[in-house]
Image (tube, helix red, strand yellow):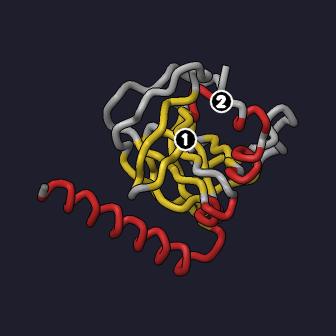
Amino acid sequence: MKDKQSLRDFQTQLAEKLKAAQVATGPSSKLGFIAGGRHWLVSLEQINEVVTVPELIAVPWVQPWFAGVASVRGALFGCTDLGVFLNLSEALPQGESHLLLAHPRFGVNAALRIERTLGLRSLDKLMREASPDAATPWSAGQWRGLDDQVWTELDVEKLVASPTFLEAGL
């Protein structure tokens, strides 16, 4: 039971640090993460929380990218394996991964299953690249770091509103 309390404390501390960092650095910082083996950025205003994946309940007759349903603090979230949804990787194995919970203002209890978080990234240290192609309307832009690493910015609001994302059933 003590471990569960420690996890809850960790999640609370992480949420406080993310909010404090956002205030300190302004809107030019984004949360970096890895999904499908690629580097991504997401605005902190578009996610509600980052949590370790709890037990996922399998759902029959769904798309391969729909990982299941999870209960997070008593609320049910539909969990999408982002790498599989974007055709970048196979489904993540059970174990260490995280969920990005979409902000409640979007009106869906959606969670994006990712490989890992990479902390905050300042856009001041990244160079904007050409606009992403129109085939991915949930891509808000691309950036390149000084180390030549490419980062794609994810627009969670457009993603969770897209018909493709909302049609999880077969």
Nearest the camera: 146 or 84?
A: 84
Q: Is residue 125 visible?
A: no
Q: Quadrant of the N terminus?
A: bottom left
Q: Quadrant of residue 92?
A: top left
- Residue located 71% across and 37% down the image: 166
Q: CA distance from mark 1 to mark 2?
A: 9 Å
- Estimate the x, y position of residue 163 in percent, counting from the top left: 79, 36
Q: Quadrant of the C terminus?
A: top right
Q: Is residue 88 visible?
A: yes
Kind of element beneath mark 1: strand
How many other residues sit within 10 Å of disc 1, few (<14), some (14-19) or many (≥20)? many
- Estimate the x, y position of residue 88 in percent, counting from the top left: 60, 24
- Estimate the x, y position of residue 32 in percent, counting from the top left: 53, 51
- Residue located 48% across and 38% down the image: 69
Relative horizontal placement of residue 55, taking residue 46 as reference (left or right): left
Q: Which residue is mark 1?
A: 78
- Circles 1 and 2: CB distance less than 8 Å? yes
Nearest the camera: 85 or 130?
A: 85
Nearest the camera: 41 or 77?
A: 77
- Residue located 58% across and 26% down the image: 65
Judge whether 2 appears above or below 34 on screen.
below
Q: Quadrant of residue 102?
A: bottom right
Q: Which residue is mark 2?
A: 168
Judge whether 114 appears above or below 25 on screen.
above
- Residue located 60% across and 60% down the image: 103
Kind of element beneath mark 2: loop
Residue type pointed to by label 2: Ala
